[in-house]
């Protein structure tokens, strides 16, 4: 029997939800500032209104529910599940007001895609969108990539409540002994790279003829969407807009850094450079990229025999890395991707489905879970080939030497199966609307693994029900299912005390 919510449970949930809504209201001042810089007065007014609405709504909740309490696990999971939906609905308001979306559901799709760092988009006439709206699309990626809750931890949560709310956002590893310190480190790394890469890309853009203001606007947006493996772009042609191999190389570096475990970043930042070579998860990640690139190139080359070797390799490698890291950047258009050989699309689907490293900005199954499964297979082989009295165990190196335990295998297997089931279910739903199954599977995997690559199914003209399906896939994939299921189970148990 699932225990029901008590009144105290609801007080804690609504109190901290209110605080996080207030945080969103203040975060909207950033795109407001961008709008004022570019003298976009009407667009800026939208952010003033929505910011005030968020702050008012948040303060209303904490006024009605003023008690600060230590959170239990079900409260933490509920707050996490609720706040991602609330942020989607509020974050969509200025986008809808921009006039670049057919409906509010389209704006919600865009908002969830941004916060979940997916990158699938329903925007219309992106090339003429006001700077502040366009910046908001990318800034939501930056907020969601580090984690909505991770931002709130530094301000609102303390002690055991901070740890529970941190785990609630599908993060299992503490980089530092204290989760507040962990949250601060994640933001320190992100902002440091933001400054470095914005400067580098901005200078490159200036050298290629951009005006300084436009050059650095593009640069900061490219970084935010790349580092947080979201894949939104300032222009409708995505990265192909720049026609610049240097930009492609830099974006690959950014997305690879974004897809690496923050714990490994911490090891490097503190001088333990050998961890780069020792970390088993990173090894599996790089080996997987290499194998998939080889087979994708082989499969693509067998069909497209007349293509230039280096151009083909550049296209294939970029998309395999883009899919595997979960960024969804593309150096081609969706029409070209749609008409690629099916075997190439299959390997991109596998790359997207596997995802990046744990405790990173990537989505998907994650390389640490793949490592666990590989190690368990190796362990089972050892058991069957060892004497009956032998005690067999497996170790792996992930920041430190760790012994593999059954609970890790169990959890990893469950999450992996849930991802695969959701990929397939979304693909089947797509076929109901008469899209080819492989293309539907591609789009479903891209949504659930929070990637953003598209073969053209995702558009403002697709059925509304399919939009809702992809929204739910992005949402559940970002929270890795279990948090959402816990929340739903307690909603079902919600009833008046007898």
Image: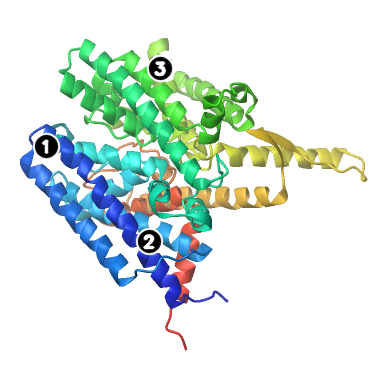
The reply, left or right, for residue 170 in relation to residue 406 is: left
- Farthest-out residue, bottom: 498
Q: Secondary structure at mark 3?
A: helix
- From the top left corner, tell me how far across and down residue 377 is, in percent: 72, 40
Residue at (45% x, 43% y) in the render: 183
- From the top left corner, tell me how far across and down residue 494 is, in percent: 44, 76
User: Is any part of residue 319 visible from this angle?
Assistant: yes
The reply, left or right, for residue 272 in relation to residue 123 is: right
Residue 64 higher or lower than 215, as above or below: below
Cα separation, mark 1 vs mark 2, equals 31 Å
Which sits in the foreground, 318 or 67? 67
Residue at (39% x, 52% y) in the render: 475
Q: Secondary structure at mark 1?
A: helix
User: Mark number for residue 457?
Assistant: none
- From the top left corner, tell me how far across and down residue 272 is, in percent: 60, 24
The first of marks 1 and 3 along the sequence is: 1
Which sits in the foreground, 61 or 290? 61
User: Mark number for residue 16?
Assistant: 2
Cα separation, mark 1 vs mark 3, equals 39 Å
**Circle 1 residue:** 36
Residue at (49% x, 64% y) in the render: 70
**Circle 3 residue:** 314
Characterize the local packing of mark 2: few (<14), some (14-19) or many (20 or more) Cα atoms within 10 angstroms.
Answer: many
Characterize the local packing of mark 1: few (<14), some (14-19) or many (20 or more) Cα atoms within 10 angstroms.
Answer: some
* Residue contact at pointers 2 and 3, CB within 8 angstroms: no
């Amino acid at each position: 029997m699932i225990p029901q919510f008590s009144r105290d449970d609801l007080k804690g949930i609504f109190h901290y939800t209110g605080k996080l809504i207030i945080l969103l209201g203040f975060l909207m001042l950033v795109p407001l500032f961008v709008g004022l810089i570019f003298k976009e007065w009407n667009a800026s007014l939208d952010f003033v209104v929505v910011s005030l609405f968020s702050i008012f709504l948040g303060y209303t909740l904490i006024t009605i529910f003023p008690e600060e309490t230590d959170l239990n696990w079900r409260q933490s999971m509920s707050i996490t599940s609720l706040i991602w939906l609330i942020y989607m609905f509020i974050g969509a308001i200025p986008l809808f007001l921009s006039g670049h979306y057919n409906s509010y559901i389209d704006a919600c799709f865009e908002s969830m895609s941004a916060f979940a760092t997916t990158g699938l988009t329903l925007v219309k006439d992106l090339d003429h969108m006001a700077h502040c709206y366009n910046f908001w699309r990318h800034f939501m990626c930056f907020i969601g990539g580090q984690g909505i809750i991770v931002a709130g931890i530094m301000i609102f949560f303390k002690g055991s409540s901070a740890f529970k709310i941190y785990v609630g956002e599908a993060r299992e590893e503490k980089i530092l002994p204290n989760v507040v310190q962990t949250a601060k480190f994640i933001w320190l790394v992100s902002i440091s790279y933001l400054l470095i890469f914005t400067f580098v890309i901005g200078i490159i853009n200036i050298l290629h003829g951009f005006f300084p203001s436009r050059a650095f606007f593009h640069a900061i947006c490219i970084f935010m969407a790349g580092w947080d493996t979201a894949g939104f772009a300032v222009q409708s042609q995505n990265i192909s807009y720049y026609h610049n191999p240097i930009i492609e190389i830099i974006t690959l570096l950014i997305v690879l850094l974004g897809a690496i475990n923050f714990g490994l970043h911490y090891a490097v930042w503190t001088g333990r450079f050998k961890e780069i070579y020792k970390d088993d998860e990173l090894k599996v990640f790089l080996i997987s990229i290499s194998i998939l690139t080889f087979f994708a190139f082989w499969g693509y080359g067998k069909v497209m025999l007349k293509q230039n070797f280096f151009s083909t390799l550049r296209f294939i490698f970029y998309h395999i890395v883009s899919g595997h890291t979960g960024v969804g950047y593309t150096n081609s258009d969706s029409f070209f991707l749609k008409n690629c050989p099916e075997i190439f699309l299959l390997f991109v689907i596998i790359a997207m489905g596997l995802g990046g490293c744990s405790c990173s900005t990537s989505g998907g199954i994650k390389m640490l879970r793949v490592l666990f499964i590989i190690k368990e297979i190796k362990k089972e082989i050892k058991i069957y080939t060892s004497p009956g009295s032998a005690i067999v165990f497996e170790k792996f190196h992930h920041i430190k030497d760790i012994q593999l335990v059954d609970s890790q295998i169990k959890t990893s297997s469950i999450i992996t199966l849930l991802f695969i089931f959701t990929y397939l279910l979304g693909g089947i739903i797509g076929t109901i609307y008469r899209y080819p199954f492989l293309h539907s599977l591609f789009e479903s995997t891209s949504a659930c693994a929070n990637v953003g690559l598209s073969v053209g199914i995702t558009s403002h003209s697709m059925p509304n029900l399919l939009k809702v399906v992809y929204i739910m896939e992005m949402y559940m994939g970002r929270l890795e299912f279990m948090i959402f299921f816990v929340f739903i189970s307690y909603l079902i148990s919600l009833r008046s005390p007898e």
